[in-house]
Image (spheres, helix red, strand yellow):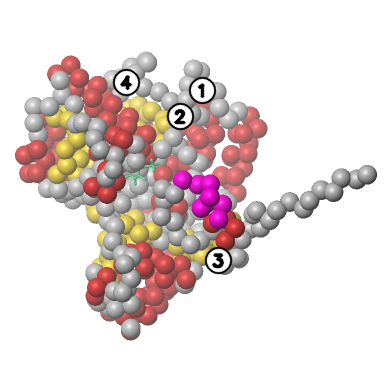
Amino acid sequence: MKEIVPESPAIVRNQQVAIQQLFQQYVVPSYGRFELALSHGLGSWLWDVNGKRYLDLGGGIAVTSLGHAHPEIADTLAAQARKLIHISNLYYHEPQGRLAQQIVKQLAPGKVFFCNSGAEANEGLYKLARKFGHDEGRFEIITAFNSFHGRTLAGISATGQDKVKKGFEPMVAGFRHVPFNDLQAVRDAISPATVAVLIEGVQGEGGVTPATPEYLLGLRALCDEKKLLLLMDGVQCGHFRTGKFQSFQRILQGVRGAEQFLPDAVSMAKSLGNGFPIGAFWIQERHADLLSAGTHGTTYGGNLLGCAVALKVMEIIEREGLADNARQLGGFFRDGIARLAAQHPKVVTGPRGLGLMIGIELAAKEQIPAFAPSDKPASTQFVNRLHEAGLLTVPAGTQIVRLLPALNLTRAEAEQGLQIIERTVAGLSKV
Ligand SMILES: *Cc1c(COP(=O)(O)O)cnc(C)c1O
């Protein structure tokens, strides 16, 4: 007799509710997620499981620098996967060496360590700093308020925002926070134990705030004077997003006395692999051998798949002139948002940022009648409205909404995105 096989239960029928139920039951609830379940993408467009299309100006939080389902990226991943995915760091392989060479070429003589995420790249910087100061008993790293450096224990200790630390005390010892863009505050915070200063060139999670040229140059001089390492977290603002490989190269472009400026080390991740998880940090020549054999490592770091795809990302960005595109479209968005702020000052108070790292600064929730009754911050409510209108963006804090799109966004797409933002703002200012 034939066994009666029951039909498999409809666990995932590609429906939003069913997917959300899976998360509710099985996924650790550590994220506040939007009510969207996405299924596939193409370039700067994404589709949800119900077939609705969105223009993606969030880029998976500054990650998908070449958009979704890029054919060359897909081919590179597939071709490398058929050859070798992983061998560990017990052995040599060509893609890691070549990727390190490309990163050095973008910065200055030095060496690169590879890992798997931004938080991990920053962990490497903390260890570099500790190693640097170890024999003199120096270990303290000064970071900025409103910074974000990742979610590991040292990452949240380094991060200058209480909300990421809450409930996880005690923090890792040896971090001090000072106001951003305030050189005197750094000088005042230096103690005999201080070994390094760590900043983002453009604060991302903290609200899209670029460092000023004077701050960068002042920090370099101060660090030289006090024998401190100047460390830069380029995880979000790096990889050509501001129009140059690293944001400091953009911020200091054409600034007198900045020709020789170099941080001692720079962390990277996000856009490096276009969504394939890879992180890295570059160390300038004079400290490049501090992390000697046996002092630092990771199993996956710099694996063939990640390095092959990151090499392809760099090749395409260079070939297609996407740093210039980021600069031009960044200007386009800034102008548009400035216009909006002039037209609707009760909703938008101004643009922020550099290149394709843009912030839309919103008025306080209480001043936007449509937002006031909800307990959600203005940034979240605005992002929700944009979702309804078919646009994906990323909130930062309570009053900033970020645009972190693919660097190969087209002018036509940028225009469409800005139109949706304009319509949404106009709708809000009418109420
Ligand atoms: C995202 C981010 C990190 C953390 O990167 P993960 O890959 O999430 O660990 C660190 N620093 C900055 C500036 C970031 O934006």
Tell me which secondary structure the magenta stretch mostly adopts.
Answer: helix
261 sits left or right of 78 in the view:
left
Q: Nearer the viewer, residue 27 or 65?
A: 27
Q: Quadrant of residue 194?
A: top left
352 sits left or right of 181 in the view:
right
Q: Which residues are magenta?
A: 21-28
Tell me the residue that label 4 is attached to. 291
User: Which of the two discs, 3 and 1, labels the residue nearer the N terminus?
Assistant: 3
Given contact means CB atoms under 8 Å apart, are the residues at marks 3 and 4 in contact?
A: no
Q: Nearer the viewer, residue 318 or 64?
A: 64
Q: Nearer the viewer, residue 431 or 179?
A: 431
SS for dot 4: loop
Tell me the residue that label 3 is attached to. 53
Ligand 1 is located in which of the four quadrants?
top left
User: Which of the two discs, 3 and 2, labels the residue nearer the N terminus?
Assistant: 3
Question: Residue at the spot x=39%, y=71% of the render?
Answer: 421
Tell me the residue that label 1 is attached to. 88
Q: Considering only vertical position in the picture, is 360 above or below 1?
A: below
Label ID, residue 301: 2
Query: Residue 426: in sight, yes or no?
Result: yes
User: Which of the two discs, 1 and 4, labels the residue nearer the N terminus?
Assistant: 1
Question: Residue at the spot x=36%, y=68% of the render?
Answer: 381
User: Which of the two discs, 2 and 4, labels the residue nearer the N terminus?
Assistant: 4
How many C-alpha atoms fall within 10 Å of the one at disc 4: few (<14), some, or many (≥20)? some
Measured Cα–Cα span from mark 3 to mark 4: 47 Å
